[in-house]
Image (tube, helix red, strand yellow):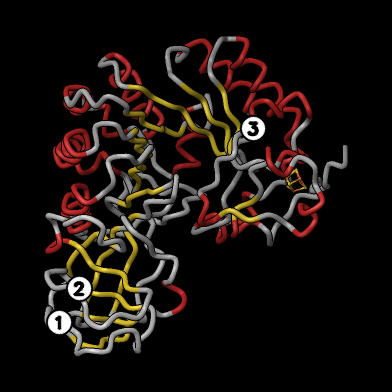
Amino acid sequence: MAALDLSSAGLQALSTRASEPFIARLREHLDDASPAREQEVLLVRRPTESLPPGFRGYLLWDEDLVSNPVPGDTYVLPPNLRYLAEGDVVRLHPERGALATLYRRASPSNTFLVTERCDNNCLMCSQPPRKQDDSWLVDELMQALPLISPETRELGITGGEPSLLKGRLVALLARMKHHLPRTAVHVLTNGRGFANAELARAVADVQHPDLMLGIPLYSDLPEEHDYVVQALGAFDETVRGILHLKRARVRVELRCVVHAQTYARLPQLAEFIARNLAFVDHVALMGLELMGFAKTNLGLLWMDPLDYQPQLSAAVRTLSRAGLETSLYNHPLCTLPAELHPFARKSISDWKNLYAEDCERCTRREDCGGFFASGLAKRSRGIQPFVD
Ligand code: SF4
C-alpha cells in the first residue's frame, strides 16, 4: 500500500499570499462558525459575491465564481482535483501551485507513508526503498492528525519500514490515540525492529485501543524468507519481533504474498504458523500487486493463481483447522476454488481497485474484490464471470 497522495500539481493561482507549504482541512459548508478557519481551506462550487474571511485559503471550481476581488491564497481547481470534498486534508504548496491529497474523509482506506527507508529489499516491494532523510513525512502526519475526522474507521501506516522510526513511531501512535481514539490503526512492518524487546514494549505501553501490526512471513525456511526479502538474518529477527510483540500483548497479523517464489511451501508455512505462532491474531495470504519491484521482477514472480490453488487450499485448511482467523486478500473470486470463497475479502483500496469488462455480467461481482488497477495487464486465465 502506498500513501494517499493522489495529485500534486495543477492549481491556477488567482491570488497568493503564503509561500511556505501548509496543511489544511477542506471545508465546504458554512452552516456553523468553525473555530479552526486558520487551518481550513474553503471549497467554493457555486457563484458568490465575495468570499467569507478568515480561511487559510480558497479553492474555486471555476475562476468566474466570485464577482468581487478575491483574498490571498485563492486557487482554481483543475478538473482532476474535483473529487475533493469537505473534511479532506491536503498539503498546499503556494509557490509551486501544487496540491497533494493526504486524507480523504469518504475513503475507507487512508494510508500514510511514514518513511521510504527500509532494511529489507523485497523482490516484490510495491514501494521500493530509498535512503534519504524523510523525517518530514512524520512531521507532516503529526500536523495532519488533529485535522482528520474522529469518525474515521481505520488508518494505515506504511513505509518503507515504520519500525526504523523507533521512538517517533511510538510518539505517532500515542498522538493517533489522543486525537483519534475511535480509529483503528494498522501498521505494515517487516517486524525486524521489534527484535528489540524494548521497542515492542514501548508500542504496547501506548495502550492504543485498536492497533494491529501486519508482518510478512514468506516461508518456514529462514533462507527462503531471507531470499524473498533480500536480507540475511531477517527471518530470525522477524520471528523474534513477532514473539516480543505478542508477549507484550500487541495484536499481530501475519501476511504472505503468494507468488512463484513462495507458493511451493505455503502448506509448510501454514504448519509452521499453526505449531509455533498460533497465538497471532490473523493470517492473510495475498495476491501479488504489480507495482514497483514486482513489475521489474515480473518474470521471477508472476504466477497464475489457478496454478497455486492446491497449495493455497492446503494452507488455508491447516490454518483454519488450527483455529486461526484466515483471510485471502487480492484474489478475484473466479480464480479460487469454491471451498476458499468464504475466506476471500474485498481488500484492494478503493482508489486502486478495478474490474475487467467481463465482470459487468458477473453475478458475484458484489462479493468479489476485483483487481489492482496495475494488475489488469497480467490477467489470470481463470477470469470468468459467474452466471448462476
Ligand atoms: S468475473 Fe470479475 S467480478 Fe466475477 S469473480 Fe471474476 S473477477 Fe470477480
* Residue hosting label 3: 344
Location of residue 284 in the rendering, given as x and y in whole percent from the top left corner: 53, 30
Amino acid under disc 3: Ala
Residue at the far right in the pictured view: 388
Q: Separation of disc 1 and disc 3 at Cα?
A: 51 Å
First of labels 2, 3 by sequence position? 2
Q: Label 1: state its secondary structure.
A: loop
**Quarter of the view holding residue 352:** bottom right
**Quarter of the view holding residue 101:** bottom left
Frontmost residue, 113 versus 148: 148
Location of residue 322 in the rendering, given as x and y in whole percent from the top left corner: 57, 9
* Residues marked 1 and 2 touching at CB (< 8 Å): yes
Label 3: how many residues lie within 10 Å, few (<14), some (14-19) or many (20+)? many
Amino acid under disc 2: Gly
Closer to the eye: label 2 or 3? 2
**Quarter of the view holding residue 318:** top right
Q: Residue sitting at 25 percent across and 66 percent down?
A: 91
Looking at the image, residue 75 lies above or below residue 232: below
First of labels 1, 3 by sequence position? 1
Q: Residue sitting at 41 percent across and 72 percent down?
A: 81
* Residue hosting label 1: 72
* Residue hosting label 2: 57
Label 2: how many residues lie within 10 Å, few (<14), some (14-19) or many (20+)? many
Q: Separation of disc 2 and disc 3 at Cα?
A: 44 Å
Amino acid under disc 1: Gly
Q: Label 3: state its secondary structure.
A: loop
